[in-house]
Image (cartoon, rainbow, N blue to C red):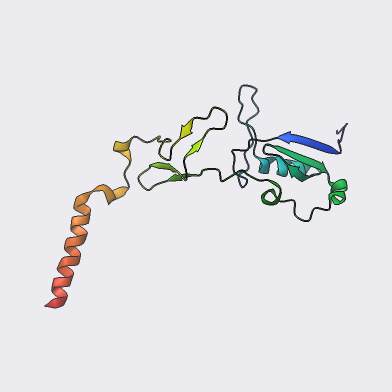
Amino acid sequence: MILYKPKIVLVEFNFTIPSDISYVQKRDFDTNHGNSLLALVNLGKQKGYELVTTTECNGFFVRKEYFHLFEIEDNSIDTLWDTQGETPRVMQMYDGTLVLSSDFRMPWNGWKVGKLDLQKVPKFARQFGDSTDVSFFKKVLLLDYNRIIKMRE
């Protein structure tokens, strides 16, 4: 049962989460991760709200029946939210190395995080099948060499 339906709602979100990721913090008062703007937009739509503007870390939503008053043609996140630069992405290399797409500074404490600072897998364990076995490459090269020699004969 809904007792109160405000016309406008302001919700803070974690601005370090990229706009295409829907992240909802677990329900736990000891956790302080925040939610993504996309997750809030999705929740807003479920509850009958539309995004009308943002600040760096706040989303402003209005009841759907008032949305037309803002004369907004496109209220997508990419249109309404200036992400202040690209959020680094995590990539996994074939050998298990984790690489960030760019260095960055953590906004809350200013600590620098480098492209290779997220390693979970120790260096000695970062391997991809036979690619780290030099004898594998020697075998391939030898097969190619023998094939070329046979073609010349």
Identify the residue at image location x=70%, y=51%.
79
Image quadrant occupied by the C terminus = bottom left
Closest to the observer, 45 or 87: 87
Image quadrant occupied by the N terminus = top right
In the drawing, does residue 46 fall left or right of residue 107? right
For this orientation, the residue located farthest to the top is 30
Q: Quadrant of residue 117?
A: top left
Closest to the observer, 53 or 110: 110
Residue 34 locus on image (x, y percent): 64, 32
Q: Quadrant of residue 124?
A: top left
Placement of 73 over or under 17, stated as above or below: below
For this orientation, the residue located farthest to the bottom is 153
In the drawing, does residue 7 fall left or right of residue 42? right
Identify the residue at image location x=63%, y=38%.
15
In the drawing, does residue 82 fall left or right of residue 73? left
Q: How many marks?
A: 0
Closest to the observer, 84 or 100: 84
Identify the residue at image location x=37%, y=36%.
121
Placement of 29 over or under 117, stated as above or below: above
Residue 49 locus on image (x, y percent): 80, 43
For this orientation, the residue located farthest to the left is 153
Placement of 147 over or under 101, stated as above or below: below
Q: Quadrant of residue 143?
A: bottom left
Residue 10 locus on image (x, y percent): 77, 35
In the drawing, does residue 10 fall left or right of residue 81? right
